[in-house]
C-alpha cells in the first residue's frame, strides 16, 4: 500500500496540470455526450417501430424480434464493454467514444441492407459493440469535470439521452412510417432500392456524423479522485483484473444488491421501450404511427425530465445530510411506481392508458442517472469504467435478455395469445420492480457507510 501511495504521489507531482474547465464548458461536454447517447438510443430502438414490416419482409416471429432487440444487441454490448472499459480507464476516452460512434452508425446503416434474420442479427451485433464504448467512457469523463455535489445532476442530464433518444426514435419514426405508408420501394442512386423499414435504418444512421464532429470539440479531462487529487493512472496501463475483482469482493453486498435492484428496474424500462408502442397498437387497435406518437411524446417530455429530477432530488437529499441520497431516491421512486406498473397497460381506453402511462414513464426514469452515479462515486478513478462495465455485463445484459423476450413469451405462454402484450407487460414489470426496490433498500446501509468513511457526503 505505501508503494502504491508513493507511486500515486510521484505521478501526481510529475503529471502536467491540464487547464481548469469552466462550469459552462463542463456542461457543454455533458450536452455533447448526452447528444451521443440520444443518437445511440435512436439507433438502438428504431427496430421496435419496424416490427410489422420486418416480420413481413424477412419472415421473422415476435420472439426473433425480441432476440434482435435483446440478445443480438445486448450480449455484445455488455460483453465487449469489459475490455473497452479497461481502455476507458487508461487511455484517451474521447477517441474511444469517436471510434465507437463511427462503428455503430455504420452498422445501423448496414441494417438497411439485411435480407435475412441472420444478416440483421449481425448488423445489430455491430451496433452493440460500437455502443459499448460510450457509457463507461462518458460517465468517467463527466465525473472528472464535476465535484461530488454536482455528479448526480450531471449524470442525470446525461441519462436524459435515454428518453430523448427513445422518444425521438418513436416520433421521427412515426413520421417516416406515415410518409411511406402505401408507397412503393424507394430507389437511392448508387445505393439501391429500399423498403420503408430499410430507409428508416439509413436515416437513423445519419446523425452519427454530426456526433463525431461535436466530439472533436471535446477535451479529455484530467483524471481525478473524488477528493480532487490527481489520479494515479494518468497514461498508465489498465490495472490488473484481480484489482477490479478484489474491489467487487470487498463491496459484494452493496454491488450485488445494486446490480439486482437497478437490473430489475432496467428490465422493466427495456420491456416498455421495445414493446409499448406495439402493445398500444394491438390492445387499442390504433395505427402504429399513432402509438409511436403517444409513447414517444411521453418519453420526450416526462421521460426526459425524470433523470434530471432524480439528479436534483438526490443532490437535495445529499445536502440535507443523507449519505445514501442516490439509493434513497431510487427506492422511493420505485416504490411509488409499483402499483401503476400492474395497472397502466390494462386501462379500458387509449385515453386512460395514456394518462396512466405518464407517471410510469416519469418514475421509471428518475433512477436512470443514479445507478451509474453510485458506482462512479464509490470506485477509484482507475477502476471506474471497469466497475461500471461489470454492472452492465450482469444487470444490463439481463435487462435486454429478459425484457424484450419475456414479454412475447409471457403473452403467448401464459395468456395464450400474441395479442396479450398488455397483460404480459403488467405481469413482468409488476413483479420485477418491487423486487428491485427491496434490493436497493438492502444496499443503502453499506453505501451510506462507504460514503461516510470516504468523506463523500456532499
Image (tube, rainbow, N blue to C red):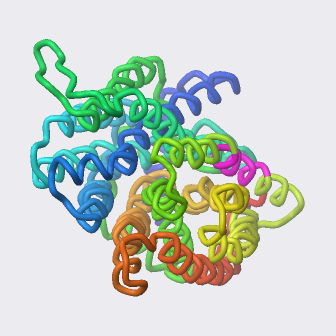
Asked if residue 311 is among those painted magenta in the image, a careful observer would answer: yes
Report x, y in % for residue 103: 24, 35
Q: Which residues are magenta?
A: 302-312
> Which image quadrant for residue 387?
bottom left
Question: Residue at image x 15%, y 56%?
Answer: 59
Q: Check the image and report above or below for 72 versus 300.
A: below
Report x, y in % for residue 143: 58, 44
Report x, y in % for residue 281: 48, 56
Question: Residue at image x 27%, y 59%?
Answer: 65
Give whichever of 434, 379 is nearer the camera: 434
> Which image quadrant for residue 111?
top left
* Residue 57 located left or right of residue 82: left
The tally of labels here is: 0
Question: Residue at image x 31%, y 63%?
Answer: 66
Q: Check the image and report above or below for 442 versus 357.
A: below
Q: Residue furthest bottom?
A: 414
Secondary structure, magenta segment, majority class: helix
Give whichever of 426, 322 is nearer the camera: 426
Q: Residue furthest top?
A: 189
Q: Residue furthest right?
A: 320
Does residue 137 appear in this view?
A: yes
Q: Check the image and report above or below for 401 versus 432.
A: above
* Residue 312 located left or right of residue 269: right
Does residue 240 appear in this view?
A: no
Report x, y in % for residue 84: 29, 49
Asked if residue 228 is among those painted magenta in the image, a careful observer would answer: no
Q: Check the image and report above or below for 354 versus 110.
A: below
Question: Residue at image x 73%, y 67%?
Answer: 333
Quarter the C terminus occupies: bottom right
* Residue 266 located left or right of residue 393: right
Amino acid at each position: 500500500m505505501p508503494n502504491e501511495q508513493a507511486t500515486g504521489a510521484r505521478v501526481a507531482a510529475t503529471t502536467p496540470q491540464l487547464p481548469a474547465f469552466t462550469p459552462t464548458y463542463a456542461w457543454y461536454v455533458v450536452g455533447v455526450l448526452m447528444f451521443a447517447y440520444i443518437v445511440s438510443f435512436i439507433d438502438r430502438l428504431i427496430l421496435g417501430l419496424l416490427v410489422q414490416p420486418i416480420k413481413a419482409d424477412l419472415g421473422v416471429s415476435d420472439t426473433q424480434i425480441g432476440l434482435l432487440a435483446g440478445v443480438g444487441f445486448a450480449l455484445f454490448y455488455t460483453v465487449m464493454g469489459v475490455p473497452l472499459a479497461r481502455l476507458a480507464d487508461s487511455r484517451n476516452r474521447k477517441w474511444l467514444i469517436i471510434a465507437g460512434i463511427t462503428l455503430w452508425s455504420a452498422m445501423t446503416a448496414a441494417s438497411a441492407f439485411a435480407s435475412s434474420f441472420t444478416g440483421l442479427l449481425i448488423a445489430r451485433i455491430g451496433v452493440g459493440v460500437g455502443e459499448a464504448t460510450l457509457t463507461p467512457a462518458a460517465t468517467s469523463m463527466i465525473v472528472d469535470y464535476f465535484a461530488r455535489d454536482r455528479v448526480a445532476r450531471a449524470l442525470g442530464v446525461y441519462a436524459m439521452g435515454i428518453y430523448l433518444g427513445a422518444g425521438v426514435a418513436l416520433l421521427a419514426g412515426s413520421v417516416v412510417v406515415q410518409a411511406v405508408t402505401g408507397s412503393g420501394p424507394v430507389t437511392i442512386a448508387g445505393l439501391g432500392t429500399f423498403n420503408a423499414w430499410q430507409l428508416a435504418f439509413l436515416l437513423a444512421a445519419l446523425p452519427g456524423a454530426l456526433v463525431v464532429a461535436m466530439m472533436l470539440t471535446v477535451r479529455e479531462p484530467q483524471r481525478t479522485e473524488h477528493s480532487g487529487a490527481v489520479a494515479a493512472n494518468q497514461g498508465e496501463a489498465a490495472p490488473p483484473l484481480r484489482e477490479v475483482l478484489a474491489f467487487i469482493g470487498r463491496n459484494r453486498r452493496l454491488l450485488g444488491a445494486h446490480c439486482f435492484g437497478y437490473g430489475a428496474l432496467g428490465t422493466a424500462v427495456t420491456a416498455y421501450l421495445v414493446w409499448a408502442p406495439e402493445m398500444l397498437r394491438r390492445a387499442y387497435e390504433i395505427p402504429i404511427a399513432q402509438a409511436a406518437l403517444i409513447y414517444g411524446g411521453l418519453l420526450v417530455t416526462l421521460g426526459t425530465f425524470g433523470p434530471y429530477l432524480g439528479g436534483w432530488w438526490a443532490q437535495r437529499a445529499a445536502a440535507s445530510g443523507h449519505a445514501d441520497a442516490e439509493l434513497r431516491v431510487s427506492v422511493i421512486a420505485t416504490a411509488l411506481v409499483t402499483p401503476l406498473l400492474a395497472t397502466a397497460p390494462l386501462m379500458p381506453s387509449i385515453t386512460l392508458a395514456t394518462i396512466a402511462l405518464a407517471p410510469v414513464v416519469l418514475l421509471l426514469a428518475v433512477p436512470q442517472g443514479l445507478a451509474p452515479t453510485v458506482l462512479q462515486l464509490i470506485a477509484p478513478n482507475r477502476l471506474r469504467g471497469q466497475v461500471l462495465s461489470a454492472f452492465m455485463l450482469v444487470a444490463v445484459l439481463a435487462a435486454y435478455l429478459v425484457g424484450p423476450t419475456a414479454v412475447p413469451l409471457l403473452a403467448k405462454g401464459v395468456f395464450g395469445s400474441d395479442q396479450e402484450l398488455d397483460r404480459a407487460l403488467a405481469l413482468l414489470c409488476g413483479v420485477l420492480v418491487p423486487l428491485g426496490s427491496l434490493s436497493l433498500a438492502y444496499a443503502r446501509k453499506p453505501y451510506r457507510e462507504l460514503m461516510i468513511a470516504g468523506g463523500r457526503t456532499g
